[in-house]
Image: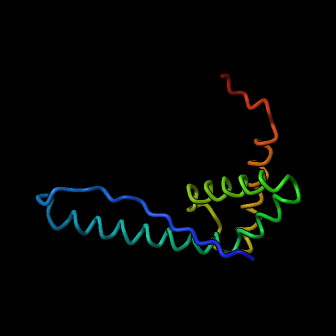
Amino acid sequence: MEDHVVVFSAPLCNRSASAGHSSLLRQTGEKARLMDRGDRFNELYQAQYETVLRYALRRTDPETARDAVAETFLVAWRRLDTVPADQAQATPWLYSIARNVLANAADPGDGRSG
């Protein structure tokens, strides 16, 4: 089994020195929140990556499966607040996202006009 490490960080807004101490406190709080979010995502990714990949591999070729899993975890990152905290409950949530991603990948008529 391969080890996968994913670290996400988001830039904090740069504020001028004149913004004062309260700005620094807001930035520090935002940084802590993002670190907690990153830690939660990394835990989810480490616990679920292989499971979701196996799910996708049962349904498509390896390259498409890896792309679908990447997209699935991108959705998970964007919607992390809605991902169940319990890993046992997160699995079906991720399967649902992966199923939709795979269905979209398989549908050549995605409704977009070129």
Residue 15's quadrant in the figure? bottom left
Q: Position of residue 43 (x, y in %)?
A: 60, 75
Residue found farthest to the left? 18
Q: Look at the image and tell me in which quarter the N terminus lies.
A: bottom right
Q: Position of residue 62 (x, y in %)?
A: 81, 56
In front: 48, or 33? 48
Give me the residue at 44% from left, 63% from top. 9
Q: Look at the image and tell me in which quarter the C terminus lies.
A: top right
Number of dots carrying numbers: 0
Residue found farthest to the right? 58
Give me the residue at 36% from left, 68% from top. 31
Q: Position of residue 75 (x, y in %)?
A: 62, 54
Image coloring type: rainbow
Q: Is residue 49 above or below residue 64?
A: below
Residue 108's quadrant in the figure? top right
Residue 99 appears left or right of 37: right
Give me the residue at 42% from left, 69% from top. 33
Residue 79's quadrant in the figure? bottom right
Q: Is residue 38 above or below residue 107?
A: below
Residue 30 appears left or right of 51: left
Give me the residue at 62% from left, 59% from top. 76
Q: Position of residue 42 (x, y in %)?
A: 57, 72
Q: Is residue 72 above or below residue 54?
A: above
Q: Is residue 48 above or below residue 71?
A: below
